[in-house]
Image (cartoon, rainbow, N blue to C red):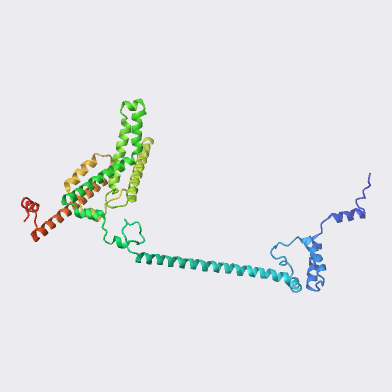
Amino acid sequence: MPSHPPRNSPRASSLRQAEKPPSFSILSKLVQVKALVSSKDLPRSSSSLSVAMGWFDGWFGPSASSDDPLKSLDPKLREYLERESPVKIQQQQQQVQEAEKKAIRIAAQAALAAEASAQAQAQSQSQSQDAAAERPIVPKESLFQDGRYAHLWKTYRPYAEVEAETKTDHEKLMDVLDGFKQRKHNIGRAALENCAIQQEEWVNCMKSGDWEDRMQMCRRQVQKFERCYTMQTRFLKALGYQSINGRSAQVEEDIQMHADQLYGRMIEQEEAVEAAKKEGLPVPKFDFAIPVAAPAAAAAHTPRPDLETSWKEKLEQLPESERAAEEAALRADFQANVEVAKNVQKLWDEQEKEKERRKAEGKATIVDRISGTFGGGK
């Protein structure tokens, strides 16, 4: 067996001393030596300096700064290195300065390009507006809206305008009445479109429904469809569907979609009320937010007292949740009737003016004389 040295022998103590890490006192002395060397006599040889620095780096670890390896050096040592080998350091400084200048130059170029593009866009818009103002006006029927062949369209008149001038008084009156009837027809058609699901349920029940529903002629589905149609009609009237002549189709479609949304909200609210009643909770109250006519328009055309009384009697027969929609629909119908009456009165006034003009010119017709005799005219 190999012999081990005694525990207290000089060899054992030297081995234990070698196994111990360097104490802090030794490290502090080394730091003092490093500062003394850097402050007094700097090594003339760069190789000896690098060797000395290599020792310190091996003990204290590499520098934490990766951007500038000379940052943690002593200021005097750093000054010496910059004086002895300034090429690499100056190159790094020049690279940083060039990068900053390049970034500033790129930002300035981008700002100039953005400003130039904005000016060009504004100039092009102004030029297009000037060109549009100078362009000859052509009607929408022309295939070339850029103003070509504008001289051919100078004497053009739309067919509707020419037809309106050649219509008789009776035809004009019938147009007003037909427009009123067409409004009702369009409201019914839009209500049917919004109730397509309920109508499909009714048809499917009649074709292949349960025997119990078919024995009752699908009464539940029929009532559901009829209620949908009635409420959709009320909402469409209240929202002013087809109440203005010449309005775009997109606006009318938006009104129709909003009426359908109101009906869906009403069904959800009714289900919430039923659930609250079953659970014994207080019944929630909802507001449909149905638009009301402007105060000026309502004051200009006030319904008669007897009409108001008939409305109240009709509303009392309906459930409370449907009264607001029905009242708004009744007032919308009243406003539509007022507009029709105004248009009819306008036609009659125009006819009377034409009759007076013909009488003043001595060109009165037989119809004018007969209408004047039986109508109490001059």
Q: For this rendering, which residue is in front, 248 or 296?
A: 248
Residue 264 appears in the rendering:
yes
**Residue 162 found in image quarter:** bottom left
Question: Percent from the top left, x then y, of residue 270?
Answer: 35, 39
Q: Dividing the picture into quarters, in which one does residue 232 lie?
A: top left
In the figure, is residue 48 to the left or right of 178?
Answer: right
Q: Where is residue 323 in the image (x, y as percent from the top left)?
A: 27, 43
Is residue 287 shown to the viewer in this render?
Answer: no
- In the rendering, at what x and y percent does residue 350 appear? 15, 56
The quarter of the image holding the C terminus is bottom left
- Number of dots carrying numbers: 0
Give the position of the N terminus as an image quadrant: top right
Q: Residue 226 or 32: which is nearer the viewer?
A: 226
Percent x, y for residue 186? 28, 44
Against 196, residue 301 (above or below) is below
Q: Left or right? Give the position of 163 relative to 195.
A: left
Residue displayed at 82% across by 68% down: 47
Residue lying at 17% horizontally and 54% vertically, measured from the top left: 346
Image position of 345 (left or right of 273): left
Residue nearest the viewer, comparing 142 with 199: 142
